[in-house]
Amino acid sequence: MAGCIGVKPNGGLCQGVAARGSDWCPAHDPARKEARRKSASRAARSKKPGREIADVKEQVAELIRDVRAGSVERSDAIACGQLYNVLLRAVSVGLKVRETEELGREVEELRVILEAQKGERRWG
């Protein structure tokens, strides 16, 4: 198993294992630059649900304060609480769908790599 010839941002050599038939690990392979960019973009977008959850927590805390202060009726607060639960469930399902799609893409990518390696063994 050959080591990757990539250089880390701190100037040190990568400790990763180079892919078969390559001098690079997947994290440094120039041919995978676009795939890494897309993955980073998806990761950045995935932070949005965390903000949604934080917003709901803040709103629920405010609702609790308002109920205690008597400015919101308990029945209204109960209805809002149920709707907040629906919203949180929708965020949770959305995250699971996104994770499943991402895993599907990763499995497909691994399948392509495996098929390419099988082809190398037959002809190499």
Image (cartoon, rainbow, N blue to C red):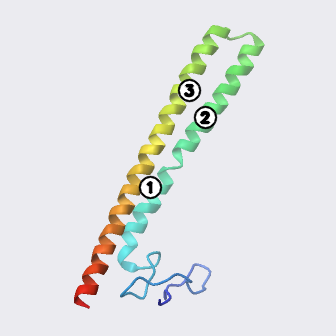
Looking at marks 3 and 2 on the same chain, the residue that comes earlier in the sequence is marked by 2
Residue 42's mark? Answer: 1
Task: Specify the farthest residue to the left.
Answer: 123
- Give the residue type that dot 1 points to: Arg
Q: Indicate the quadrant containing the C terminus: top left, top right, bottom left or bottom right.
A: bottom left
Q: Is residue 114 above or below residue 81?
A: below
Q: What is the number of the mark on residue 85?
A: 3
Q: CA separation, marks 1 and 3?
A: 26 Å
Residue found 32% across the figure and 68% down from its top: 111
**Closer to the eye: label 3 or 2:** 3
Q: Secondary structure at mark 2?
A: helix
- Say few, some or many: other residues with alpha carbon within 10 Å of mark 1 (under 14 / 14 to 19 / 20 or more): few
> 10 Å neighbourhood of mark 3: few (<14), some, or many (≥20)?
few
Q: Earlier in the sequence, mark 1 or mark 3?
A: 1
Residues tagged 1 and 3 counted as in contact (Cβ below 8 A): no
In the image, residue 23 lies at what x, y percent?
Answer: 42, 88
Above/below status of 84 relative to 116: above
- Can you tell which quarter of the image residue 77 is in? top right
Name the residue tied to disc 2.
55
Decide: is 119 above or below 85: below
